Image: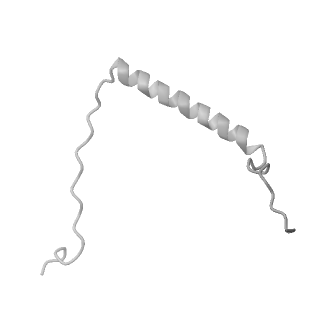
Amino acid sequence: MSGREGGEKKPLKQPKKQNREMDEEEKAFKQKQKEEQKKLEELKAKAAGKGPLATGGMKKCGKK
C-alpha cells in the first residue's frame, strides 16, 4: 500500500472559465436585474420601519 491509496483523493482541477464578450441583450438584462434589486432593497428598508401589517383583522371575543 502506498501512502495515498487508502485516503482521500485530490479532486480534479476545474477548467478555467472563458471570459466572453457580453452582447447588448445580456448587458440590458444585467442592468434590469440590478435596478430590480435596488427597488427590492428600498422596499425592504421602508417596510422594516413599520409595525406588523396584519393587525387590523377581526378579533375573536371570549363571550358567546
Residue 16, position as x, y percentages in the image? 25, 42
Pick whichever, 29 or 59, lies toward us.
59
Pick whichever, 27 or 48, lies toward us.
48
Image quadrant assignment for residue 4: bottom left
Residue at (36, 18) in percent of width and height:
24
Residue at (78, 51) in percent of width and height:
55
Instruction: Find the residue positioned furthest to the bottom.
Output: 1
Pick whichever, 12 or 34, lies toward us.
34
Pick whichever, 14 or 33, lies toward us.
33
Instruction: Find the residue positioned furthest to the left.
Output: 1
- The mark total stands at 0
Q: Left or right of 26: which side holds 64?
A: right
Q: Left or right of 53: which side holds 36?
A: left
Colour setup of the view:
one colour
The quadrant in which the N terminus is found is: bottom left
- In this rendering, the answer to whether 13 lies above or below 2 is above
Residue 49, position as x, y percentages in the image? 77, 43
Image quadrant assignment for residue 43: top right
Residue at (36, 21) in percent of width and height:
25
- In this rendering, the answer to whether 45 lies above or below 2 is above
Instruction: Find the residue positioned furthest to the right.
Output: 63
Q: Left or right of 28: which side holds 50?
A: right
Q: Left or right of 49: which side holds 5?
A: left
Instruction: Find the residue positioned furthest to the top.
Output: 24
The quadrant in which the C terminus is found is: bottom right
Residue 6, position as x, y percentages in the image? 19, 78
